Every structure is written in structure tokens, then in C-alpha cells.
Amino acid sequence: MHAFLRKLAALLTTYYAYMLEYRAELILWVLAGSLPLIMMGVWGEAARTGDFSLSSLEFTRYFLAVFGVRQLTIVWVIWDFEREVVEGKLSLRLLQPMDPAWHHVLSHLAERLARFPFTLSLVGLFFVLYPLAFWIPSPSQVGLGSLAILMAFTLRFLMQYTLALLAFWVERVTAVEQFHFLVYLFLSGVIAPLSVFPPLLQQILAWTPFPYLVHFPASLWVGIPVDIAGGFVIGPAWIGLFWVVNRWLWRKGLQHYSGMGA
């Protein structure tokens, strides 16, 4: 176990150094995730003239939390894995004494570390421009919100990595992700808080994985009422399900894989 942890630490250090080489690109990616800030203005203005369950200030804080959640949970493993399969680069990873998935996990974690200062600076600038939106989460909000973000990243990664394994059979699996991303935007709480959806739709969505990718952790951060117990039961249940499907597709896919050197 000690040797395995040393390998993980070495990979994390390597990927972090790699990410630092592209700091300018990281800034662009941080800005590219600013859709929640745009929706903040839309819903904030709507709250001033309409009748919603959230006030204009609550909408502002919610979408700022959504921006933070998305910065910490963004995943791109499907594009990397598809390229590895199509170009035969996966063969080199299979020769190493560890699951290739660790490369993707650690590259994502290293990117989070490199991205964090830029994200924090943008959030700080936002509070300078909108001081009324500033709030200090309670210890329980910080703890539960952070745990929910870890759950959201794990679930999002497994969902996309499971789709990525279809690259063993489909040459352009990223086309599937593009459709999945649209569903993710509308049902996860990125476009609108799920609390403004019709009650029946909220009940249906509660049994899907989407609310626990963005809406659930963002709501915990800002103190919007959510089913905390249910979220921490249903979310891990979906993680377990995707893990089982992922491992099954991985075994079947390796039998089908015929990349260069395989």
C-alpha cells in the first residue's frame, strides 16, 4: 500500500507541474465556466418582478455557489479516454502496474489545485463588486457542502468515465457526451435552481443522479433547504451503480480492444 501511495503522489506531482505549464489556458477555462454568473443576473432580475421561492439575493448566492461547484467538479475524462483508445495510446497504460483510471483521476485533482487560485480570485472580485451577496457559511454548511462536492465529483467522474468506456465500441463517443451534457445543464441545477421546478418534477428528479451533481452541494453551501439525508443516500447509491457498470464495461471493453500494441 505504501508503494502504491508513493506512485499516486508521484503522478499527482507530475500532473500538477504539467497543469502549471498552461496557467493562461486554465484562466480561460475558469472564465468558460461562467454560465452560472450569467444565469445569476437573469434569475435575480426575474425574482424582482416575479413570485419565486427564492429572493433575488438568494438567487445570487445560489448561482455563485453553482459556479464554485462546477469549478470543482468539472470532468473531461471522456475526451482523453476516447483519444487514448482511437490512437492506441491505451496500450502503454495497460502495461503499467495500475488501473489507467488513476491517471485520469489524478490529472483532474491536479487541475483542481492549479485552477483553485484563479477561481478564488474571481469569487473575491465578485464580492468586491457585490458586497451585499457576501455571506459566511456555518460550520455545518461548510462540512456538508464539502462532502457533497466530493460526492458530486465522484459521481460526475464515474458517469462520464462509464460513457467513455463505450469508446471500445463507438469511434466518437464524445457525441454521446454532448447530448448528455445538455441534460446535465437543465436537470442538475445549472440553468435554474430545482426548487423553481414543478413539485412533481422535483420528486422525479430526486431519484435521478442529476440533482446531486450541482444543485445539492450548492444548496448546502448557501443554506437552501434540501433533503440532506436523502441526498447522501441516493447520491452514493448512484455512485455504486455506475461503479458496477463501469467495471463490467471495462472488462468487456478490454476483450474487444484492438489498439496498437494491444
Image: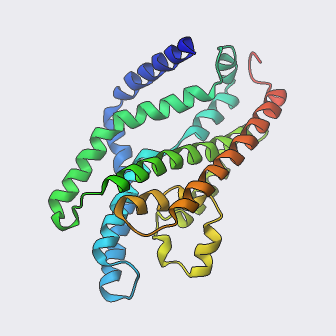
The answer to whether residue 187 is left or right of residue 128 is right
Q: Say how the picture is coloured.
A: rainbow
The answer to whether residue 238 is left or right of residue 23 is right
Q: Quadrant of the C terminus?
A: top right
Question: In the image, what residue occupies the spot 36% across and 30% down?
Answer: 22
Relative image position of residue 59 (x, y in whole percent): 34, 71
Relative image position of residue 60 (x, y in whole percent): 31, 68
Question: In the image, what residue occupies the spot 69% across and 41% down?
Answer: 243
Decide: is 36 above or below 107: below
Count of marks, rendered view: 0
Relative image position of residue 14 (x, y in whole percent): 43, 19
Relative image position of residue 211 (x, y in whole percent): 55, 62
Question: In the image, what residue occupies the spot 63% across and 34% down?
Answer: 81
Q: Is residue 34 visible?
A: no
The answer to whether residue 124 is left or right of residue 152 is left
Q: Quadrant of residue 78?
A: top right
In this rendered view, identify the residue nearer to me: 44 or 228.
Answer: 228
Q: Quadrant of the N terminus?
A: top right
Decide: is 189 above or below 125: below
Question: In the image, what residue occupies the spot 34% across and 44% down?
Answer: 28
Q: Is residue 251 visible?
A: yes
